[in-house]
Image: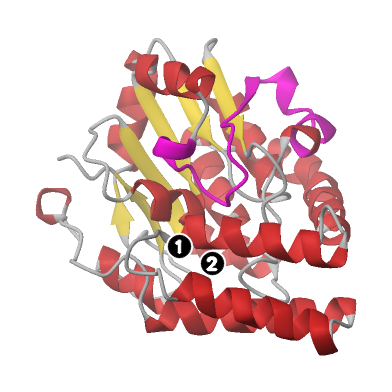
Amino acid sequence: MNSDSKNLNPHKLVDDQCVHCFTRSYQRIFKKFNIKGDQQTDFIGYFDEVMSQKDKLTSPEIQQLLKSKLCRLISIIDPYEEEKKHSNELALSLYPKWKAKVLESPEPFEMALRLSLAGNVMDYGAHESFDINKSITEVLSSPLAINDAALLKERVSKAHKILYLGDNTGEIVFDKLFIETMMHNNILFAVRGGVALNDATMEDALAVGMDKVADVISNGFDAPSTVLHKSSDAFLDEYKSADLIISKGQGNFEGLMNVKDHRIFFLLMAKCNVIANVLGVKKGSFVVYNQAQ
């Protein structure tokens, strides 16, 4: 897709495919925590109530409501705690190898960017399993479906302040490598304001040493996305004052895709048909996308 021809396709905020995806996700959680009987009936009733409002809510807002209900129902703060820890440990085990390869590369920015895209596959909220090594091979050897990487590199070189919106645990290790490769002295890395599926919180970011390469801040809202009208004032101050915003992952794209802002670059894998159709790419495609061209 040419840079001068990109326009998002029109879509509903949440369509029937999204509802099916939510259903499958929570069926897996029911199985994991052996949720049955009255607890399951209670949750399904709330699920139906929330879905009756799907024309008024974004996907991340729905996820936040459902997650909060589930955690109250089963008295568990972080349903993906084990998966998040595993993701970070797996990514950290790969980090030395790929950092060395980036340093050896004739195009370190491009390679580190692509590795950060590969990291977006590490998403237990969307899939039961993933193959990070396969994802790395694919993204390093294939053209990007939308490729505004050269423009991003130019903007990074000119930016005074960069706000990087993080997504999943595990993935953030590859984001750390990309941030290191930028060699910029004023980068803020934003995490979720609380537990949100397998997304990175402050605790997760500190566990992988993100604070060594960027100033880590919270967006103030416990949804698997960046939802501006729900974010904290402190986060919004940083958002407004940044002259470059790197929005990582499909979750952040879902929260910000209708924000017309030339500062935002979306870096993601299109993990479902809904988002692939919005972007005009095939499911599974990797994109670096600046909407306001």
Residue 202 in percent (x, y) is at 74, 32
| Sequence-first tag of 2 and 1 | 1
Mark 2 and mark 1 residues within 8 Å of each other at the beta carbon: no
Quadrant where the N terminus is found in the figure: bottom left
Instruction: Using the rendered view, name the quadrant where residue 119 is placed.
Output: bottom right
In the picture, the disc for residue 215 is none
> Against 67, is 223 above or below?
above
Q: How is the image coloured?
A: secondary structure
Q: Is residue 99 visible?
A: yes
Secondary element type, mark 2: helix
The residue at the point 80 percent across, 54 percent down is 84
Residue 277 in percent (x, y) is at 29, 73
244 on left or right of 224? left
Q: How many marks?
A: 2
At label 2, the amino acid type is Glu
The residue at the point 88 percent across, 76 percent down is 33
> Against 132, is 167 above or below?
above
The residue at the point 46 percent across, 54 percent down is 268
282 on left or right of 286? left
29 on left or right of 135? right
Q: Which residues are magenta?
A: 204-230
Of residues 27 and 152, which is closer to you in this image? 27
The residue that mark 1 highlights is 59
Crowd around label 2: few <14 · some 14–19 · many ≥20 (10 Å): some
| Residue furthest left in the image | 4
At label 1, the amino acid type is Ser
The residue that mark 2 highlights is 138
Alpha carbons under labels 2 and 1: distance apart: 28 Å
Of residues 164 and 73, which is closer to you in this image? 73
Of residues 117 and 29, which is closer to you in this image? 29
